[in-house]
Amino acid sequence: MKRLFLFVTCYFVIFLSFGQEIIVSPSAEHALDSLYREDQFYVGVTFNLLLNRPDGISQSGFSGGMHLGFIRDMPINKRRNVAFGLGLGYSLNVYNHNLFIGEEENTGQSIFNSLKGVEFSTNRFAKHLIEAPFEFRWRTSTPETHKFYRIYTGLKIGYLYYFTSNFKQLNNEVRQTKIDELNRWRMGATFTFGWNTFNFHFYYSLNTLFDDNALINEVDSVGLNPIKIGLMFYIL
């Protein structure tokens, strides 16, 4: 964890240093404006869903996510309203559901079961990811205003570096952090559109959260494709 934190911190410092614009003098203001970039920092909140659930698995309560990061905006035309974006970010996602994740005492093998019909107070898992978004960007921006329409679409590659599953019921608690069946490398398609401050954001995972070894009753594949729907806010 410490090495990962140090790597991410150094990456951000180097990334931001390349992204800085140097203001020479007031006389150069017009030239600098003509080379403007947009939407370099982002903060987002989402409502999270799990698609392609096996029989007996459902979500309950609120499942949400928080996302933040930096994207290097790289305009590709003279007007600078079409661009590519490449960045680095952090994402936290929590899911409430009735999928029990446990472990065999003797073998250490993961157990997946439905809690349908079972009383419990808490059952959820949380994902912490380092993500690298890649976007194709179109907007109606100009050097004079930061209020404009935007449509951004692309891919987001991530690594799930920390996962925790918590189950609680009367006189019983199970917590799992090491699950071999996780697909830790994540890839998803993204689509963002909006005007000015408020922008709607969609994310669909292109690969399942668990691999083919994750089975319920040794028959049904757990799978699960996360989808996120929410708002994205951009800052220069």
Image (cartoon, rainbow, N blue to C red):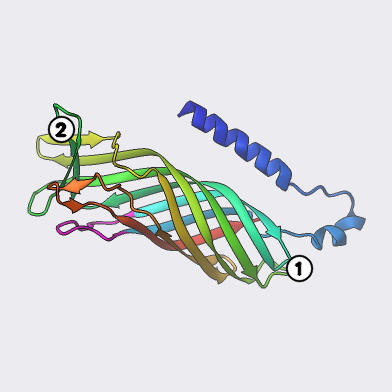
Residue drawn at the location 43% of the way across and 62% of the way down: 230
Find out whether residue 51 is within the magenta segment. Answer: yes
- Nearer the observer, disc 1 or disc 2? 2
- Amino acid type assigned to the residue bearing label 2 in the image: Glu
| Residue that mark 1 sits on | 144
Q: Quadrant of the N terminus?
A: top left
Asked whether the residues under the numbered discs 1 and 2 touch, taking CB atoms below 8 Å apart as contact, a structural biologist would say no
Q: Residue furthest left?
A: 117
Q: Is residue 123 left or right of residue 78?
A: left
Kindly state the secondary structure of the residue where label 2 is placed. loop
Q: Is residue 143 above or below residue 23?
A: below
Measuring from the top left, give residue 201's x and y in whole percent: 47, 64
Q: Is residue 141 left or right of residue 212?
A: right
Q: Quadrant of the C terminus?
A: bottom right
Return the residue nearer the eye: 75 or 124.
75
Measuring from the top left, give residue 78's x and y in whole percent: 78, 68
Measuring from the top left, give residue 138's x and y in whole percent: 63, 69
Q: Main secondary structure of the magenta part?
A: loop
Q: Is residue 93 above or below residue 136?
A: above
Real-space Cα separation, disc 1 to disc 2, in angstroms: 62 Å
- Amino acid type assigned to the residue bearing label 1 in the image: Glu
Find out whether residue 189 is within the magenta segment. Answer: no
Q: Earlier in the sequence, mark 1 or mark 2?
A: 2
Q: Quarter-wise, where is residue 47 in the image?
A: bottom left
Residue drawn at the location 71% of the way across and 61% of the way down: 75
User: In the image, which residues are magenta?
Assistant: 50-63
| Residue that mark 2 sits on | 104
Q: Which mark is residue 73?
A: none
Q: How many marks?
A: 2
Kindly state the secondary structure of the residue where label 1 is placed. loop
Q: Is residue 37 left or right of residue 168?
A: right
Q: Residue furthest right?
A: 27
